Image: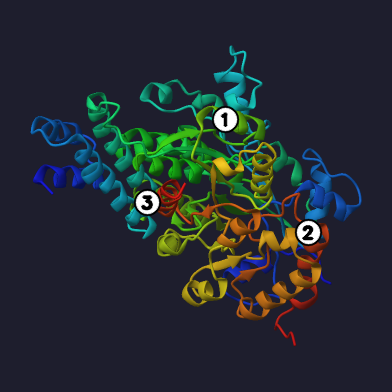
Amino acid sequence: MTDILETIKETVVGGKFREIEDQVQQAIDDGINLNRIINDALISAMDVVGKRFANGDIYVPEMLVSARTMKLGLELIKPRLGSAEAEKRGTILMGTVKGDLHDIGKNLVTMMLEGAGFKVVDLGVDLKIEDLIDTLKREKADILGLSALLTTTMPEMQKVIEALQSEGLRDQVKVLVGGAPIDQKFAEQIGADGYGEDAAEAVQLARKLVATK
Amino acid sequence: MDVKPDFERIRKTARFEEPDRVPMAEILIDYSIQSQFLGRTVTPDDLEAQVQFWSQAGYDFIPLTVGMMQPGKVTKESKISKVIREVMLADSADADKEEAWNLELTSFIKTRQNFEKFPWDVAAELEFGSFHKVNDLLPPGMQVIAISGKIFTLTWMLMGFNHFAEALIMDEQLVADVFKQVAEIQFKGLEEIFEMPRIAAVWVVDDLAFGTGPMISPQAFRDHVFPWYREMARRCHEKDRLFLMHSDGDLNALMDDIIDIGVDVIQPIDPTCMDIVRFKEMYGDRICMVGNVANELLRSGTPADVEARVKELLVKVAPGGGYCMGSGNSVPDWAQYENYMAMRNTTLTYGTYPIHID
């Protein structure tokens, strides 16, 4: 990897948001392939950040500032990318299920998925199934990510999957579930396609699910 | 069953002594549970019935909330919600829409300008009516624990969690200033109640951790949150009051700090992510513990399951004092009444010191 790509990666990992734009501009001026800046520096940095977070070496603020730093760099590159150059990684709908207002975990996963290059449509909290179905049809999403913090709201995930089945959409979208009371066993019980224990694992799973879709 | 209130039970327990029996403690028991226990409807305004419930159920105190989160959580009636709806959204057509005022759905302080415009003076007008009224209702031996705090939670709720988390690094002074405003209002409430004779303790309810660990770094807690709690503990101890703390989540990374700032009692040793037996081995000679009967067990278990768990806690955690029986958070409306009663009855039946359960 060139020095400037390594520097950009370190800047994102360290959340040095004031320095990123000059460095990315330098990489662009040096003629480095734009997709290399994205993949080898920006997204690669967020993989490191995700692992550090999962290991408990950094906390939510550090992770969010790294993501913000990454986005600042990405914003400089985006206008220069032709549509053919922009790699399509997939579209993901994210939401917290009906009756549940908790969004910290859902927002972390959303941010990490964006950092990994996915297009994410955030449906917010207290998700109405009919709104979800409408958005799913409109966005033709590859993955639906569902979050729940409460044991009393986790059964809503099954209701969503049943609604997807009755609308004939179940085969078109992979369902990824997560949240404090959720585990792999529950995910399998309700017929979800995957369970992510944390934000980093959710990203790995999303990549895998899109690749096998 | 001895249900005569005696706050000395909790004091002894907090000093790692064995009183007559294991005390019970909760920050909140839903009114629906209180109503079933008394056989009549208990409402938020019916303080007499609430005192009757807490004393007859076997508690040595009644928890009363003071501060901006009165009456205890974000609801339409919460002090902070009223400030937002009646002052900040006074001219807005959206004032009645939940998404416009509920701090779980929206936030108000993103910039220095937002901070300066926030009606802090109105937010600081706290209510003490129930604290005055309760004096005439308390039976002998029963005291009040003032539920306060939420310095961390209220700050991030006012700023929105993501924005707060980013600002902690990108605009640290703004975060520090919001913390200071929130803390000073909460302290103002405490100053008033410290002058009241039946207030035996302050219980700060402020979730600091996720199930995976602290919500922000331990250093950020040391810089911005713990100094306020250290001061709160100092003022409590100066006035001979106990200082209790509630936090969900895995607190292991913060425990040395929590003990160092002067917290006497910690609740609930979140059963979804912490092992209370190991916790007692590590910290049990330095801090008193409350709780750990999982809320999920209270919701979906049977009374026999609850009885078995309570007996296990009595045997493994209660000997030597330093432990009060209670739920893994609070007792919500979705806890099964029979399971709540199993927790209570098992404690009263088998919790007499010295503990002997076959």
Looking at the picture, does residue A29 appear above or below residue A203?
above
Provide residue A164's location: percent of width, then percent of height: 64, 40
Quick one: SS at disc 3?
Answer: loop
Q: To which quarter of the image does residue B88 belong?
A: top right
Q: Name the kind of residue labelled 1 in the image.
A: Lys
Residue at 69% x, 42% y: name it: B131
Which residue has dot 1 on it?
A137
User: What secondary structure is found at the residue carrying circle 1?
Assistant: helix
**Camera-nearest label, 3 or 1:** 1
**Which mark, residue B140?**
2
The crowding category of the residue bearing disc 3, from other C-alpha atoms within 10 Å (few below 14, some 14 to 19, many at least 20), is many
Residue labelled with disc 3: A59
Q: Amino acid at mark 3?
A: Tyr
Q: Calculate the distance from the C-alpha at mark 3 to the C-alpha at mark 1.
A: 36 Å
Q: Amino acid at mark 2?
A: Pro
Residue B49 spot, x, y in % from top left: 84, 47
Q: CA distance from mark 2 to mark 3?
A: 47 Å
